[in-house]
Amino acid sequence: MERTLIIFKPDAVNRGLAGKMVTRFEDKGLKIIAIKMETLNPYKLKEHYAHHKEKDFYDELIKFMTSIPSILFVVEGKEVCAVVRKMIGSTLGREAEPGTIRGDFSVSNQANLIHASENVDVAEDEIKRFFDKSEIHSYQKMDFDWVYAKKEKGYLDSKDK
Ligand code: CMP
């Protein structure tokens, strides 16, 4: 079953939006299999944002992201990377579509509340970077049979059926 890494950034924590934001993912029917609050390690973060190293906002971004704790999640679902990226909206909060998390709660490009993995391959690396295996849980979600059709469940790991 597909997994993604989600980070509620320091602005989401400081503005007290974590509850509202996590509710959206729960309401959507996605399965949270790991969650923790942590001030992000600058070394891991530099690795995470390595592709932005040359950007003029890079140093500020690292400072911002390590300023106070973030909340990190691993979330599971069918095609979950694409589903979550759609739910969070485009990078610049001012331009993000209403109805998305950034579109509803952010007006910034840096303070855009949330990170989610771009695709399955990236997600695998990002989850390994921020979570130990022992922090990721396997459990039967009560509403599972009502969230997916039988055919869709055919794509899932047998342990999740
Ligand atoms: P995200 O897309 O999750 O990952 C890269 C982050 O860099 C992005 O969120 C923003 O937090 C930040 N970012 C992107 N563009 C800018 C910008 N123009 N100025 C400042 N920060 C930015």
Image (cartoon, helix red, strand yellow):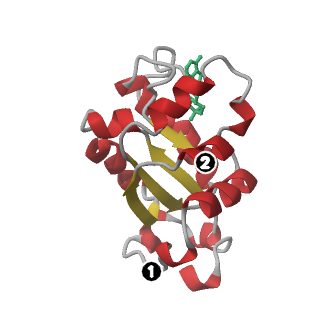
Which label sits on residue 139? Answer: 1
For label 1, count other residues whose C-alpha is less than 10 Å away and answer few (under 14), some (14-19) or many (20+).
few
> Sequence-wise, which precedes: disc 1 or disc 2?
2
Please indicate whether residue 97 sits to the left or right of residue 81 in the image. Answer: left
Above or below, comparing residue 63 to residue 29 in the picture: above
For label 2, count other residues whose C-alpha is less than 10 Å away and answer few (under 14), some (14-19) or many (20+).
few
Q: Please say whether residue 91 is visible from this viewpoint.
A: no
Please indicate whether residue 16 sits to the left or right of residue 115 in the image. Answer: left
What residue do we see at 48% from left, 47% from top? 7
Above or below, comparing residue 54 to residue 149 in the picture: above
Which label sits on residue 43? Answer: 2
Q: Amino acid at mark 1?
A: Tyr
Location of residue 154 (image quadrant): bottom right
The N terminus sits in image quarter: bottom right
What residue do we see at 55% from left, 71% from top? 132
- Percent x, y for residue 30? 46, 59
